[in-house]
Amino acid sequence: MSALARRTGSVNLGQGFPDWNPPEPLLAAASHAISHGDHQYPPVRGLPELRRAVSADLALRCGIEVDPETEVVITAGATEGLTAAILALVGEGDEVVFPEPFYDAYPAAVTMAGGVPVTVPLTGPDYVLDEAGLAAAVSPRTRMILLNTPNNPTGRVLTRPELDAVARTAAAHDLIVLVDEVYEHLVYDGREHLSPAAVPGMRSRTLTVGSAAKTFSATGWKVGWVSGPAELVGAVARVKQYLSFATQGPLQTAVVAGLNLPASYFADLRGAMERRRDLLCAGLTAAGFAVTRPEGGYFVLADASGLGVTDAADYADWLARHGKVVAIPGGTYFTDARSGAHLLRFAFCKTDEALRTAVARLSGLR
Ligand code: PMP
Ligand code: GLN
């Protein structure tokens, strides 16, 4: 879709990357590390200073204590962290339960591990995860529950009752819980991100995946991390050793500078993204889409039924060519693409100017 955006001169509200640079202190730290730093293999588990920074951040924000020596591994983005965790812990025929719609890497990673994706269908506009739905998806072959909060593509931020339901289900069936928290800092309207690992009883069974990509507007850096109990993290590190061996050293150093930024950086990012969300939601509504205001993350999953859309893939192609706006067809996030055939995902991690141009073009289509 990004190639289509370039070809058609469209505003790219498809792929989730910001169209601005990482903060200056990270750029300065990266330049310094490249000019004066170490360019050879970092340790498999990551630079000790970055593991310490991740551990301190988890303690401060989530009240989760992890030992930087044994309970954190730095990965080549959250993508490698998630895939390494799944390859490490999911065996042939093991089932992995996750809500649908889902981030597209999940069924791919589970399938590569020889596992079986089992989804819990959530329906819009609320996309609530309920205990009965979760319980219905669990079988004697279930090994893992996989969650993403704040969510791509729905914009949901899981609530305490939803996490309590996950905790009860995981305890009842002795399951591992893998949590993708790459949008942890992007929560809106005064909400708080709740880390499932901090729910009583969950720490010993939960692996948490984070990333510098969204928090520091550095999606191309591919620096992420996985934290959790030493035994599980050790298994992830053993797989990571044979996927990439190590993660790019100078950029790990730069991410330490990011995690040490003052609280105001994170608050400002959140505020700016909340404003962009409002701008896009208002524009999409005026253009005839039905939107649920995202509670967190980068994306709006918009319902185009009111515009007569029944094939989002076709419509996304038409929209790029005739409306000069790129969005991702909703089918991408479902097992059966037909379930998302009336949906389009729009990213709002774009400059105000890009969003305003997109909104003007969309309103001109009616
Ligand atoms: N998880 C989710 C939910 C995402 O949206 C993304 C998008 N980049 C990733 C993981 C991957 O993160 P990274 O770039 O750190 O691999
Ligand atoms: N996570 C980003 C998105 O959902 C992009 C990642 C990718 O293109 N694979 O748009």
Image (spheres, rainbow, N blue to C red):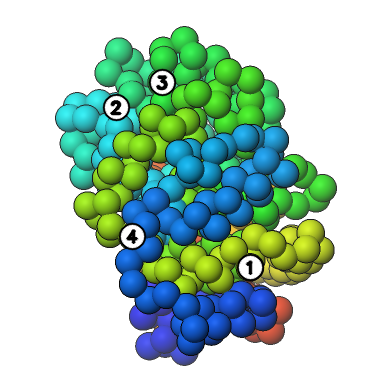
For the residues labelled 4 and 1, say whether their Cβ atoms are less than 8 Å apart: no
Residue at 64% x, 35% y is 64
Label 2 CB less than 8 angstroms from ligand 1: no
Kindly identify which numbered label has been placed on residue 246.
Answer: 4
Q: Say which of marks 4 and 3 sits in front.
A: 4
CA gap between label 1 and label 2 equals: 39 Å
CA gap between label 2 and label 3 equals: 10 Å
Q: Say which of marks 2 and 3 sits in front.
A: 3
Rendered image quadrant of residue 304: bottom right
Kindly identify which numbered label has been placed on residue 95.
Answer: 2
Compare marks 1 and 2 and give the one earlier in the sequence. Answer: 2
* Residue at the spot of label 1: 257
In the rendered image, the residue lying farthest to the top is 172
* Residue at the spot of label 3: 175
Q: Classify mark 3: residues with Cα within 10 Å, few (<14), some (14-19) or many (20+).
A: some
Compare marks 4 and 3 and give the one earlier in the sequence. Answer: 3
Residue type at mark 2 is: Glu
Compare marks 2 and 4 and give the one earlier in the sequence. Answer: 2
CA gap between label 1 and label 3 equals: 35 Å
Q: In this view, does 230 lie to the left or right of 199?
A: left
